[in-house]
Image: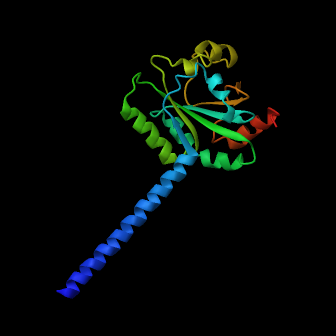
Amino acid sequence: MYVHSMNLSIKWYIFFILCSFVVKNSFSQQQYENKKIKFIESVTEYSTLEEFLSRPIYKDKIVYIDLWGTTCLPCLREFKYMNTLKKKLKNYDISFLFICQNTQGDTNNEWKRKWKSIVNKYQLEGTHIYTYLKPPDKFVHEKIDFEYMKKNINEPLGYGIPRYLIAKGGKILIYNAYKPSDVFKLTHQIDSLNLF
């Protein structure tokens, strides 16, 4: 009986140690993710995207902006190239801004959970903003509207997603940047701006 009880105690001790290890590692992983991934669920204090880009954290930095949606398969396909892109651009002073556009027109928490789940799945390091298309969220559409796209990018139907932009100093410089899978073209595009 004493041996059986001792074996049971040892099993519980091992179980306790393993649980502690798992909890400690998941907490460490969560801390790591929090440092690399920042979620912003509301941008109501900013009236435009360019106003947001004028924040001190983006001062003198190039900002690569990814406009995407949770149900956009081409958007999701591009995410697998993000780590390669970041490695290629590691010597650039560049920040990544991801703007998820919800077409549902409500503040449904299920869609926000899906948004965060996708970001964490692909480990998309950078700042993440959640916006609404219906009704149009002026944060994005004040500057990136159909008229602008028709006039400046020769796209008569406006813009779709995925869409990539490059900004610096609070100004959007390129409204039709190359996608992450076109890493060499994108690097050349950034170099051609002579921003350094």
Q: Position of residue 12 (x, y in %)?
A: 29, 73
Q: Position of residue 101 (x, y in %)?
A: 50, 28
Q: How many marks are shown on the rendered structure?
A: 0
Q: Nearer the viewer, residue 139 or 145?
A: 139
Q: Is residue 30 above or below residue 10?
A: above
Residue 169 as seen in the image, left or right of residue 111:
right
Residue 169 as seen in the image, left or right of residue 39:
right
Q: Nearer the viewer, residue 81 or 171?
A: 171
Q: How is the image coloured?
A: rainbow
Q: Position of residue 71 (x, y in %)?
A: 44, 33
Residue for point 40% across, 38% down: 113
Res. 143 image quadrant: top right
Q: Position of residue 103 (x, y in %)?
A: 44, 24
Q: Is residue 89 above or below residue 172?
A: below
Res. 174 image quadrant: top right
Location of the C terminus (image quadrant): top right
Residue farthest front in this picture = 2
Residue for point 40% across, 24% down: 104
Residue 101 as seen in the image, left or right of residue 113:
right
Q: Is residue 42 above or below residue 145?
A: below
Location of the N terminus (image quadrant): bottom left
Residue for point 53% across, 41% down: 77
